[in-house]
Image (cartoon, grey):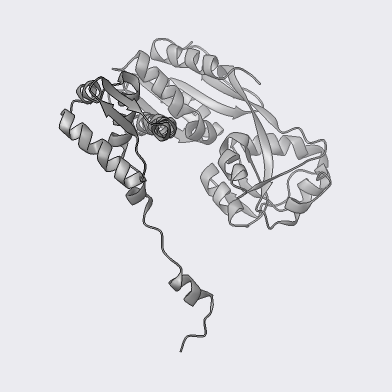
Amino acid sequence: MSDGGPEDAADRAPRRSPLAHRVPDLGALELLLAVARHGSLGRAARELGISQPAASGRIRSMETRLGVALVDRSPTGSRLTPAGVLVTDWARRIVEAAEAFDAGAQALRGHRDSRLRIAASMTIAEYLLPGWLVALRALRPDTAVSLYAGNSAAVADRLASGEADLGFVEGLRIPAGLDGATVAEDRLLVVVAPGHPWARRRTPVPPAELAAAPLVLREPGSGTRQVLDAALARYGGTAAPLLELASTTAVKAAAVSGAGPTVLSELAVTDELAARRLVAVELADVPLRRALRAVWRRSQRPAGPARELLALTTASNPPR
């Protein structure tokens, strides 16, 4: 006989269907956006290269899945319902994210005939570069792009060896032998899981206490580690790491699981902070800001697609 423990309760709890069964597919969301642009189901169908009956069927299927009416159809055109306007706004964010995903994935395929070879540190590659590549593709749709993602030291090595045309690094200074330009500024945050004692702390953590605490850290050579080590150098430097991991995603996952405090880019933890999966810890007198830089070999000023990408990064990320 069951003792009614937690596992039994979990077995009895209703299971949610997979997200793919609850959210409309990307094609349906693109169709809804096209209807919003054109005010006509027929013109939206022509833009996407499908028949009007197929488009109408997709809209009905989406309405059934979501349980709300999205489009009012009439002889004079198609108009979004109030619910349709709201869903369209959400759909636009998903489609934009999918475009960034596609641009990044295409760059990772590493075409042998690439005309633009990019090397980027992990934070920039994960959180900024996909959007820049979408913008570049709009300007140069035929440009083949390859992407290498690693820490800032590895990016510098790629440029020095001629394996990359343009690089992006995060840290205190431009690596030796390279020229560069600041494209944005970034703030590093100390973050912990909600159950950590620092999450309930009412006074800022002093530098000496942060330096003495075992942290979950990126590996030496990363821009994040470089900035943290420099900030705590006068307090004896960082203690031996609790964990040392080679990617921002791995560090973040360890922190969310409660492994210990970590230091990450504000770009990387926006969603986790909003959902309270992580809590930002206030520090006393520890400057944790850094420049995000585009870099290139000193003798080779960016030209062609590299120059255009550089212009896009500086235009879309003015210093804060």
Give the position of the C terminus as an image quadrant: top right
- Seen in the image, is 183 located left or right of residue 118? right
Name the spot of residue 315 as percent of width and height, x first.
53, 14
Q: Give the image quarter of residue 115.
A: top left
Q: Give the image quarter of residue 187.
A: top right
**289 lies above or below 237:** above
- Seen in the image, is 186 located left or right of residue 149? right
Determine the residue located farthest toward the front in the rendered image.
75
Picture residue at 59% right of the left edge, 37% below the top? 222
Q: 199 or 255: nearer the eye?
A: 199
Q: 320 or 153: nearer the eye?
A: 320
Picture residue at 31% right of the left edge, 17% below the top? 141
Observer able to see residue 71: yes
Q: 113 or 178: nearer the eye?
A: 113
| Label total for image | 0
Name the spot of residue 163 as percent of width and height, x first.
41, 26
Observer able to see residue 247: no
Name the spot of residue 219 as percent of width and height, x first.
59, 44
Name the spot of residue 251 as percent of width and height, x first.
57, 48
- Seen in the image, is 248 located left or right of residue 188? left
Q: 106 or 134: nearer the eye?
A: 134
Determine the residue located farthest toward the bottom in the rendered image.
1
Picture residue at 43% right of the left edge, 29% below the top? 130
**71 lies above or below 1:** above
Picture residue at 33% right of the left edge, 25% below the top? 79
**125 lies above or below 17:** above
